[in-house]
Image (cartoon, grey):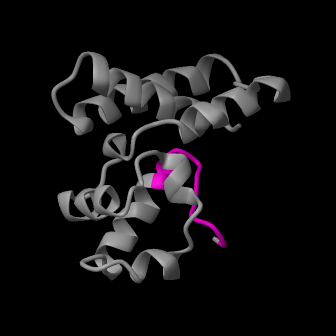
Amino acid sequence: MNRWDHFAGIALRVYLEKYSTKQDAMDVTALAAAVADRMIELSPPDSESAPVEKEKLDWPVGQLDISKRAYRCFKHNDIETVGDLVRYSPRGLLRFQHFGRTSLRDVKRALAVFGLSLKGN
């Protein structure tokens, strides 16, 4: 787990708990990251990365910054968690009705924020 994974988790918690927009949460998190860069170097033990990774995979796909079209497509195809989503390849997702290149790009970006990617990427 790198330092940006840690701050991506903070951004999600800040967004869910206190702020009304994702941009507000990301701004607060960027400020926290800048302060932390000057004060300490984050290097959590490797033993912590497995539980954090599992925690990410258990998040509902609705917590990702994706379009409503992509979200509805995932719900229609019984993709409920991030873990379900990362089991698909980009080609597999593009086979879903109403899921195109723009939705795929948005999903890849949303996963990348949390250090995750689709199968085969």
Nearer the observer, 87 or 64: 87
Start and end of the magenta stretch?
111-120
Which residue corresponds to the image point at 56% horizontal and 41% vertical from the top-left? 57
Which residue corresponds to the image point at 19% horizontal and 57% vertical from the top-left? 68
In the displayed structure, 68 sits above or below 44; it is below
Q: Seen in the image, is 20 located left or right of residue 66?
A: left
Which residue corresponds to the image point at 63% horizontal and 71% vertical from the top-left? 121
Residue lying furthest right: 46
Q: Quadrant of the N terminus?
A: top right
**Number of residue marks:** 0
Q: Magenta stretch mostly in which secondary structure? A: loop
Image location of residue 98, percent across then percent down = 24, 78
Q: Seen in the image, is 55 located left or right of residue 60?
A: right
In the displayed structure, 10 sits above or below 119; it is above
Image location of residue 62, percent across then percent down = 31, 44
Q: Quadrant of residue 24?
A: top left
Q: Seen in the image, is 40 located left or right of residue 106?
A: right
Image location of residue 9, percent across then percent down = 49, 30
Nearer the observer, 40 or 99: 99
Membership of 59 in magenta stretch = no
Image location of residue 105, percent across then percent down = 38, 71
Which residue corresponds to the image point at 44% horizontal and 74% vertical from the top-left? 93
